Amino acid sequence: MKAMVLESIGTPLKLIDRPDPIPGVGEIRLKVEACAICRTDLHVVDGDLPHPNLPVIPGHEIVGVIDSVGEGVASSRLGRRVGVPWLGHTCGHCPYCAAGSENLCDQPLFTGYTRDGGFASHVIADEHFAFDLDADADAVSLAPLLCAGLIGWRCLNKAGEGKLLAIYGFGAAAHIIAQIAIWQDREVFAFTRPGDEDAQAFARSLGATWAGGSDEHPPKQLDASIIFAPVGALVPNALRAVRKGGRVVCGGIHMSDIPAMPYRLLWEERELVSVANLTRHDAEEFFPVARSAQVRTHTKVYPLEQANQALDDLRAGRLSGAAVLVP
């Protein structure tokens, strides 16, 4: 197999050849068709997330076809197209797993971080954390749904049922969830980097009611805000944008420090919450909704060996939608 491997933090990924991996008990092997690149991959590569299992193959928005199964896995799964997300394994017995909050498991494994991911021609996955996907759909279009879509869906649910929704950071997750929110008859107010007219035009093309810089104030008070950009300084702005009793949802796994702010921004029963990882139940809900809403992902394709260029383009904000690697 070929893989782009992170050998040490802060260094470019290295293209290497390895023997094809062999699935163990309860595992499957996928021949990777496509793997989208998430901002979390940047956080792994750049060292924002501590203690990756180095050397590691990043990538956790994986679409592929099962070409080998381990002991205990039904042979009927061979040939099926599946998707593999960030949450790659849970213990199943800690208090969080027992309570149905497997996203908060005490002993999880994360794809592309603590176990090898999908920047490769093949990947091993826990069969219980691989979701059946439409065999006739385009693999590149499906790949961003495995994290940008799933985490966005969890954020949207956390935001509540308000009709006026702010989204800060209009990238891969935002462009998916904006389509679903508009399908749900909500109004979307998109906040981008100040002066990023291309991103604002992109948001409006998807149906956003309003688009402007993150330093601007929306034309009306909103019901909720979702922050996808990993910028803690946006939290006070997002709180200012919501009405009394409104909610701000922080959707990233990593964010820069939130600055000191006056209590009055939080007062009047505004809420500030975070989202961590995902659950398999999120996927059970999300994929039918994405299909019904006719979500169309906007992607830019890179060959596997150009993973470093794709990461640089994401880091520099040169992408609209999602970057996708194709082996």
Image (tube, grey):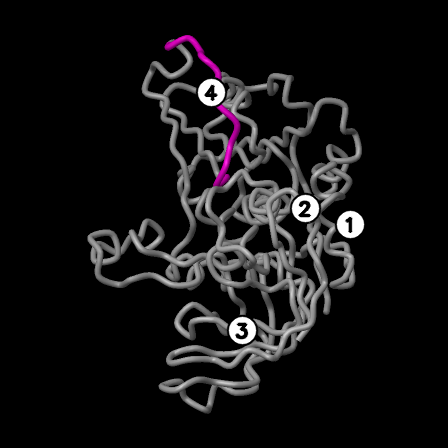
Q: Nearer the viewer, mark 3 or mark 1?
A: 1
Secondary structure of the residue carrying tag 4 is helix
Main SS category, magenta section: loop
Secondary structure of the residue carrying tag 2 is loop
Q: CA distance from mark 2 to mark 3?
A: 31 Å
Q: Which residue is mark 4?
A: 239
Q: Which residue is mark 1?
A: 309
Q: Nearer the viewer, mark 2 or mark 1?
A: 2
- 248 to the left or right of 299: left
Please, what is the three-letter code of the amino acid marked with disc 4?
Answer: Leu
User: x, y (%) of residue 59?
Assistant: 59, 58
- 97 to the left or right of 292: left
Looking at the image, tell me whether mark 3 or mark 1 is earlier in sequence order: 3
Please, what is the three-letter code of the amino acid marked with disc 2?
Answer: Thr
Badge 3: few (under 14), some or many (20 or more) residues near its Cα, within 10 Å? Answer: many
Please, what is the three-letter code of the amino acid marked with disc 3?
Answer: Val
Residue at position x 47%, y 85% in the image: 69
Looking at the image, tell me whether mark 4 or mark 3 is earlier in sequence order: 3
Q: Which residue is mark 3?
A: 82
Q: CA distance from mark 3 to mark 1?
A: 27 Å
- 129 to the left or right of 190: left
Residue at position x 48%, y 55% in the image: 53
Q: Quadrant of the C terminus?
A: bottom right
Q: Which residue is mark 2?
A: 11
Looking at the rendering, the stretch of residues picked out in magenta corresponds to 252-263
Q: Residue 112 lies in what quarter of the image? A: bottom right
Q: CA distance from mark 2 to mark 4?
A: 37 Å
Q: Nearer the viewer, mark 4 or mark 3?
A: 3
Q: Quadrant of the N terminus?
A: bottom right
